């Protein structure tokens, strides 16, 4: 049985105001947060203790994240300045004006080679890692872009806005690939399912919608009690958690959107982030602290992985002698929990164990095509 419960709240000194953004480190041992007080603060997740603080700006910070290798903290201030800080020494490595208004989201691509920012200036900017001062601007929204997220395969990304729409973008051409309309108020949160088939979005009026990404069609809609501050698709590919501003959390099934568990808390939620393990969610609140909600029972469900098929030369002396190389298909996959990459010679009909973290994996029959090696 799956349940939700608040594991605890941050102890020690917190932010001097609301927490606007938070992000787990890759190993899940820490959470980085950004707040109204202009500080970045690092929390140890085991006891939710504040262990480090960096004064990043004289103005409030609107969002934060970490570099894929964990060596840098990224912060964005309300004046549109994007900054990189050494995670150990806290020395400033790089900063520049990335947008003319507050930055709402900073998102690295799954391969870590691209960086996407969304802003109140109604724009998104796609940047190459190593050439962050340059970027491709994407326009189309008519109001604040309140968030964005990459698709699991990194080929597309989703943005959502106070104009009531979500837009799908092609990461290669930087052109709009689809649009989702139906919200009657600002869209405040959204996410992709792990297989990329579904998108879930929430609005200021408490409406939550499920979208078929390929058909660009709405398939479910429910109305909750307050503004939706977070949508988090879980690693089983069959569940999503929504979080309201009033602290009400619901675990839903996908795509039918039936309630599987609920939790009423007194957390005044501002932001959140799903842990790399997929077994807890960190929530930033109005009280300047991080709260952690545990997702019990989810660890028992196999994690959905979508393999990538490639063709490579098959080793063998006869093929080389005859000048007729033989080829074989293999299937590569990445465990969402620990990021270990494995290879299969065929698609299994039953769950397998990750070689690194031993979590059960459910290999999808949908296969991405890679170029021959």
Image: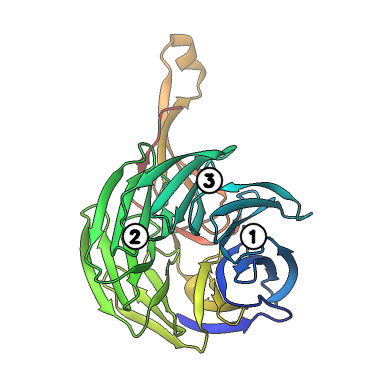
**Which of the marked residues, 2 or 3, is nearer the chain's N terminus?**
2
- Dot 1 alpha-carbon crowd within 10 angstroms: few under 14, some 14 to 19, many 20 or more: few
- Dot 3 alpha-carbon crowd within 10 angstroms: few under 14, some 14 to 19, many 20 or more: some
Where in the figure is residue 177, as x and y percent of width and height? 28, 46
Q: Is residue 366 visible?
A: no
Question: Can you identify the residue that label 2 sits on?
Answer: 143
Question: Can you identify the residue that label 1 sits on?
Answer: 27
Closest to the camera, between mark 3 and mark 1, is: 1
Question: Can you identify the residue that label 3 sits on?
Answer: 342
Closest to the camera, between mark 1 and mark 2, is: 2
Secondary structure beneath dot 1 equals loop
Residue 273 sits above or below residue 357 on the image: below
- Marks 1 and 2, Cα distance to the nearest angstrom? 36 Å
The number of numbered badges drawn on the structure is 3
Where in the figure is residue 147, as x and y percent of width and height? 42, 60
Q: Is residue 320 visible?
A: yes
Q: Where is the N terminus found, in terms of image quarters?
A: bottom left
x 35%, y 36%: residue = 173
Where in the figure is residue 80, as x and y percent of width and height? 53, 55
Residue 60 sits above or below residue 112 on the image: below
């Amino acid at each position: 049985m799956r349940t939700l419960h608040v594991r605890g709240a941050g102890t020690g000194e917190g932010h001097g105001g609301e927490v606007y953004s938070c992000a787990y480190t890759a190993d899940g041992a820490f959470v980085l947060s950004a707040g109204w007080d202009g500080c970045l603060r690092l929390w140890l997740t085991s006891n939710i203790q504040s262990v480090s603080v960096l004064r990043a700006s004289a103005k409030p910070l609107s969002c934060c994240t970490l570099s894929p290798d964990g060596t840098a903290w990224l912060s964005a201030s309300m004046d549109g300045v994007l900054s990189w800080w050494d995670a150990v020494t806290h020395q400033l490595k790089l900063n520049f004006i990335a947008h003319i208004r507050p930055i709402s989201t900073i998102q690295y691509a799954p391969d870590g080679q691209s960086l996407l920012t969304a802003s109140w200036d109604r724009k998104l900017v796609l940047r190459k890692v190593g050439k962050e001062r340059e970027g491709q601007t994407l326009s189309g929204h008519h109001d604040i872009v309140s968030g964005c997220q990459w698709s699991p395969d990194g080929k597309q990304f989703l943005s959502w806005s106070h104009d009531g729409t979500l837009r799908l973008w092609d990461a290669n051409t930087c052109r709009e690939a689809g649009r989702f309309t139906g919200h009657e108020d600002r869209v405040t949160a959204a996410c992709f399912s792990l297989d990329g088939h579904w998108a879930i979005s929430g609005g200021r009026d408490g409406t939550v919608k499920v979208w078929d990404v390929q058909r660009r069609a709405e398939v479910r809609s429910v109305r909750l009690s307050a503004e939706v501050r977070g949508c988090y698709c879980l690693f089983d590919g069959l569940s999503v958690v929504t979080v309201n501003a009033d602290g009400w959390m619901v675990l839903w099934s996908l795509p039918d959107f039936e309630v599987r568990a609920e939790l009423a808390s007194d957390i005044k939620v501002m932001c959140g982030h799903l842990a790399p393990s997929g077994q807890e969610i960190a929530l930033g609140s109005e009280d300047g602290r991080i709260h952690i909600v545990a997702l019990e029972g989810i660890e028992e469900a196999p994690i959905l992985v979508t393999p990538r098929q490639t063709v490579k030369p098959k080793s063998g002396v006869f093929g080389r002698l005859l000048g007729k190389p033989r080829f074989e298909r293999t299937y590569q996959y990445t465990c969402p929990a620990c990021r270990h990459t494995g290879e299969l010679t065929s698609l299994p009909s039953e769950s397998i164990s990750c070689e690194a973290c031993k979590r059960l994996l459910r290999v999808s029959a949908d296969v991405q095509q890679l170029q021959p090696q």
